[in-house]
Image: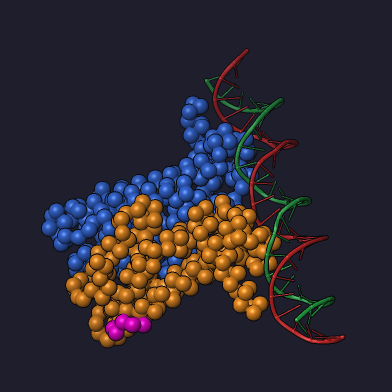
Chain colours: A orange, B blue, C red, D green
Amino acid sequence: MAQERARERQRRILEAALQVYARRGYGAATMDEVARASRTSKGGLYFHFPSKEDLFLALLRYAGQRLLEKAQEAMAAAPDPVSRADAALSTVLRTFSRHRALARILLLEGYGAGRRFQAEVTALRGRCAALVRGCLEEAMAQGLIGPLDAELTARAWFGAVAEVIVHWLQTGQPRRLEDAYPHLRALFLRSVGLPPGGVDHHPTP
Amino acid sequence: MAQERARERQRRILEAALQVYARRGYGAATMDEVARASRTSKGGLYFHFPSKEDLFLALLRYAGQRLLEKAQEAMAAAPDPVSRADAALSTVLRTFSRHRALARILLLEGYGAGRRFQAEVTALRGRCAALVRGCLEEAMAQGLIGPLDAELTARAWFGAVAEVIVHWLQTGQPRRLEDAYPHLRALFLRSVGLPPGGVDHHPTP
DNA sequence: GGAAAGCGACCGACCAGTCGGTTCTGCCAG
DNA sequence: CTGGCAGAACCGACTGGTCGGTCGCTTTCC
């Protein structure tokens, strides 16, 4: 019905906005461009979203949701906290590897367009870090790793991954983003005192 | 002489621009604001900088230079590669801890205002990572640490630090940025297979 | 005196947001 | 079935404010 239809239309607009903002950046992209890309009109845009700012905010939430869902899904299938964190890492790398636009929006354009957006992105990054933090705390409780500041460690890991991805976005190195996976994995495991070997839960052939 | 005078004026403009852009963000800040803050006029601004974009680009270079110089200075005084990396870490944390505006410009506002700026910031981050990379390669050559991907490790470390700083900027946690130092230090040392103890070269009382 | 530096009123492009009008869509009375 | 109505969805020309950039003039310095 109408409800359905409206939702579909909003999705189409968000998907188009994702591409346009990723390509041009928030500041340079105009509402006319987004309208054209989503095969609607400015009026149509403003019918569904009250302002340019709100559209971008909705886009950040939409994109963030997509990422978090994938990560949580992958983590749910893993048996122990360590392989859960592992699954999250490889999933994030794989997701951003396809969907460059998603990476641009969440890791690059999100910051840099006013305080309101920065807060939103920070919150999103916090939620990502919280997932990892959960793994770390569980691993600590099970005596798998020694005591450490789980909050800070999780954030540091996330920052490390983000930096590698941004560099890949900007320079194209490493050629395949997934190539960074084994190195990051080894680095992270060692950083909490675990041997870097172990089973590779998500091989990237 | 005139040369001198011009340089002084440019410094004053850049210093004012640093504050204004840090407070308002690149997009929202106007040239009139920067002119007022630097106690000049729009005409004066455009006499020294050809456009708003160029002003911000010069600001990024200016701010980046300040950071890099501090880091290199601190590293020069350290005897071995490990304590050089250590010195870089604590210096970066301390520098951003004072000079929040510097942190905002380099880590937050830099991205998010068009491709040209993103490239500049990426280059700057690359130069920071290169410093750390040098330490790692030296440490490897001296057999202090096992073989690893120095490029990627350096970048990962930098990303981790950046994330912690950005979180501090946005939320004010940890209360004193330097409080994160021992945890990050331990994390980094372990991540390359070194014992997390060792001498604390830069105690933060 | 003249060149470099500085000033600020002004201009015009640009674009977010508006609004009067049009077209769909679901529904119900006849 | 169908005519027609209500309101949701959509359209795009237009506007009004904003702000980067200009330019003719003044001041400062050598």
Query: In which quarter of the view is residue A141 placed?
Result: bottom left
Is residue A77 magenta-colored?
yes
In-front residue for pair A38/A60: A38
Q: Is residue B181 visible?
A: no
Left or right of B26 in this view: B166? left
- Image x and y of residue B53, in percent: 53, 43
Left or right of A12 in this view: C11? right
Q: Which residue is drawn at 52% across and 70% down?
A: A62
- Image x and y of residue B113, in percent: 51, 51
Left or right of D25 in this view: B162? left
- Image x and y of residue B191, in percent: 24, 67
- Image x and y of residue B181, in percent: 33, 65
Which portion, as a residue range, is magenta? A76-80
In-front residue for pair A19/B164: A19
In the rendered image of this protein, does residue B40 appear above or below residue A173? Answer: above
In the rendered image of this protein, does residue B75 appear above or below residue A12? Answer: above
